[in-house]
Image (cartoon, rainbow, N blue to C red):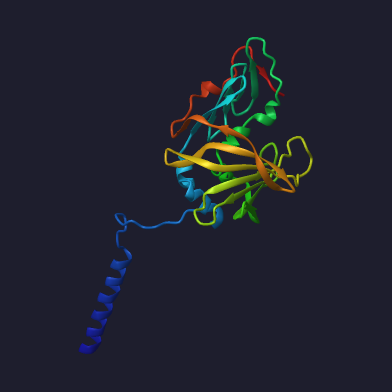
Amino acid sequence: MKNLIGLLIILIVTISCQQAKNKTDYSNDDLEVTTSIYPDNITKVFDAHGGIDQWNKMKTLSFTMDKPNGKEVTTTNLKTRAEQINTPTYTLGFDGNSLWVNEKEGNAYKGNAKFYKGLMMYFYAMPFIVGDDGILYEEAEPLTFEGKTYPGILISYEAGIGVSPDDQYIIYYDADSGQMEWLGYTVTFGKNEKSKDFHFIRYNNWQTVNGLAVPKSIDWYTYENNKPIEKRNTVEFLDIVLSEEVPDNTLFAMPEGARVVE
């Protein structure tokens, strides 16, 4: 009987210790939690540029490009994708619903507003912009240029995503560092089918802004048989703003005298 009582006591103590162990407070411990919902290869690229979590904190992106007619300043609300593109001769705006253009001093806007809206922002915000919802990732054939081989990630879109859901992109990156080195892209705006014709931009000039590696300049290349050949031109980005502050919505509102682009 005494042995039975002793065994019961040992059993109770063991269970109590196990329950106490299970209720350990981990609130002050530094636990590693994996939250990535992306494939390993694109996560490696994101991480090489500061991480998708850091990017997702940002709400305002602004940059300036020198154009033949003067400075072109693009400002985007990264959460709503409202945008203003301001130049000496016109301002192009999108308030989240309507696209508008304001022609200045009698200068007629001759561009394609629907095509140009968001275009340079998209190129600038690589690679993070391909972390948007509705994107599909596949491995692509590597790119070899001047003796170096870059692994590729093919980016495509679910049906109904954006104005050109048939667009495709290929991000090519350094196999060791994960840094993005090239972008291959197709243009399907205004077409009814996917294109197999890839254009190429080289990303090899980065700067750090608010903890993120973003382009200081990018180089367009001539191409042949879906391969880059030689540098054609360089676009530089100035006065970069990448902020957690929300931009003023009045920036994107259509001013008096502007017209809606249908």
- Viewer-proximal residue among 247 and 120: 120
Q: Which percent across, then down, holds residue 27? A: 31, 55
Residue 72: quadrant of the picture = top right
Q: Residue furthest left?
A: 2
| Count of numbered circles in the view | 0
Residue occupying the point 30% across, 71% down: 18
Q: Residue furthest right?
A: 192
Residue 259 lies, with reference to residue 16, above or below; the image says above
Split into 4 quadrants, where in the image is the N terminus?
Answer: bottom left
Q: Which percent across, then down, holds residue 249? A: 52, 24
- Viewer-proximal residue among 95 and 6: 95
Residue 130: quadrant of the picture = top right
- Viewer-proximal residue among 196 and 98: 196
Q: Residue furthest top?
A: 105
Residue 52 appears in the figure: yes
Residue occupying the point 57% across, 38% down: 218
Q: Which percent across, then down, holds residue 36? A: 50, 53
Residue 166 appears in the figure: no
- Tell whether 129 sits left or right of 260: left
Residue occupying the point 72% across, 39% down: 187
Q: Which percent across, then down, holds residue 71? A: 56, 22
Split into 4 quadrants, where in the image is the C terminus?
Answer: top right
Residue 178 lies, with reference to residue 126, above or below; the image says below
- Viewer-proximal residue among 238 and 241: 238
